Image (spheres, helix red, strand yellow):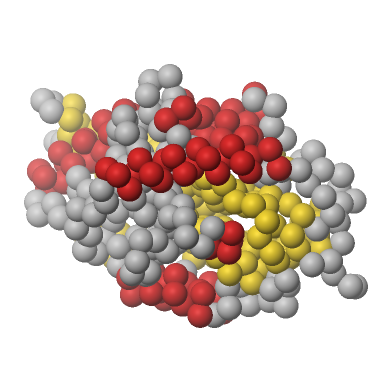
């Protein structure tokens, strides 16, 4: 979830009882289904979606009416991102991915953060240096923990240029960020049984303008897709991250996805942070549009009455009790695909880092699905 642009929702309307019930349900479901996830057979594989949290919601600069407010907001963002300790959290995210053992992973908010000096006398930013590279940190953690994954696609969506900030009392700096959508695939499966082709990516036309005292930055979103042959089955795997808080833009992006990369004769799996509420009711129009267009929601297919909460912990990811209150991270299917099992990851307190941070402000979602064999 990225909280830039548009209006913002009211306070989360969830009760402590709902949270405790949901967390207990996650523990039970994980215990019941985890051992079977990742055990691939002909036409049966596991896919995952995980928003790994870039470390801020950018609320500190939304609504800034003058340069001083904006400078202080940028400084607060830099402090907040540092407090979320991306390298340590990517270790925890890697552990959750390996626990799910998916064949394909759709990741969101996999960011590169840059930082450099700012000269307040000239109003210019100096050379920016890479501060955090979340994809490099995650892939290194996966390999160190025994995983076998490669990056199939790494697609930028939101690119915020070098912007001045101030950390009180007198530390001036510049910070910039590029937010990526990523698809990972396992490399330890016989290539005769698992082949990828036709990797594609793009940005949505529908976007949100973000107005700052230093100019307007478009908040774009992107998608990534790859065609997959798995044993005798073929399908298209799509990952994306739709707009957070401007519903008409989010709905337009969903429509673009359906008439664009998802417009194929192949069965389709969409693994995404939809930012479109599937639970609790009322459901978001973007989610309703997908269901009305013939897509199946694997979670609802398997657990029609369970909430399956995936979002959101405190943006600082240091809350002691889970604050997940809605389901927006979904795995949707179209065509001859049937959900078999689905599990949440990173939603239990035991998955937190040694410093007490959640792996992400989202839970990861992994589903085992069966795909009809192709007759060709």
Q: Name the residue nearer the viewer: 103 or 153.
A: 103
Q: Quadrant of residue 13?
A: bottom left
Quadrant that contains the C terminus: bottom right
* In the displayed structure image, the side of residue 268 where residue 155 appears, left or right: left
The residue located at (26%, 31%) in the rendering is: 79
Position of residue 362 measured from the top left corner of the image (x, y, whole percent) = 42, 45
**In percent of the image, x 42 and y 30: which residue is there?**
349
User: Residue 93's spot in the image, x, y percent?
Assistant: 52, 35
Residue 116 appearing in the image: no
Quarter of the image for residue 72 reads top left
- Seen at 9% across and 51% down, the residue is 66
Percent across and percent down for residue 195 are 81, 54
Q: Quadrant of residue 235?
A: bottom right
Q: Is residue 84 visible?
A: yes
Query: Which residue is situated farthest in the top direction here?
Result: 354
Q: Position of residue 275 (x, y in %)?
A: 40, 60
Q: How many marks?
A: 0
Residue located at (69% from left, 32% from top): 147
């Amino acid at each position: 979830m990225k909280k830039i642009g548009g209006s913002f929702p009211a306070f989360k309307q969830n009760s402590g009882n709902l949270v405790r019930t949901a967390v207990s349900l996650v523990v039970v479901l994980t215990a019941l289904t985890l051992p079977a996830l990742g055990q691939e057979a002909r036409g049966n594989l596991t896919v995952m979606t995980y928003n790994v949290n870039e470390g801020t919601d950018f609320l500190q600069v939304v609504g800034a009416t003058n340069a001083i407010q904006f400078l202080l907001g940028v400084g607060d963002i830099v402090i907040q991102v540092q407090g979320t300790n991306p390298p340590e959290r990517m270790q925890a995210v890697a552990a959750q991915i390996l626990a799910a053992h998916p064949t394909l992973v759709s990741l969101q908010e996999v960011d590169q953060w840059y930082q450099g000096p700012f000269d307040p006398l000239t109003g210019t930013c100096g050379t920016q240096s890479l501060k955090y590279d979340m994809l490099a940190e995650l892939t290194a953690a996966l390999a160190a923990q025994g995983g076998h994954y490669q990056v199939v696609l790494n697609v930028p969506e939101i690119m915020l240029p070098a912007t001045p900030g101030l950390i009180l009392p007198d530390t001036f700096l510049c910070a910039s960020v590029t937010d990526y959508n990523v698809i990972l695939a396992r490399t330890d499966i016989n290539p005769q049984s698992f082949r990828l082709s036709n990797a594609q990516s793009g940005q949505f036309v529908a976007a949100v303008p973000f107005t700052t005292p230093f100019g307007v930055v478009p908040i774009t979103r992107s998608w990534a897709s790859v065609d997959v042959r798995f044993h005798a089955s073929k399908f298209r795997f799509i990952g994306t991250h739709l707009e957070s808080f401007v519903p008409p833009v989010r709905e337009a992006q969903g429509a673009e996805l359906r008439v664009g990369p998802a417009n194929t004769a192949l069965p389709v799996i969409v693994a995404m942070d939809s930012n479109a509420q599937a639970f609790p009711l009322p459901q978001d129009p973007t989610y309703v549009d997908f269901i009305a267009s013939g897509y199946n929601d694997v979670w609802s297919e398997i657990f029609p009455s369970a909430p399956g909460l995936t979002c959101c912990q405190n943006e600082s990811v240091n809350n002691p009790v889970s604050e997940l209150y809605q389901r927006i991270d979904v795995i949707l299917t179209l065509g001859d695909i049937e959900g078999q099992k689905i599990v949440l990851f990173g939603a239990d307190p035991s998955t937190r880092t040694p410093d007490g941070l959640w792996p992400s402000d989202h839970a990861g979602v992994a589903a085992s699905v069966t795909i009809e064999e192709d007759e060709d």
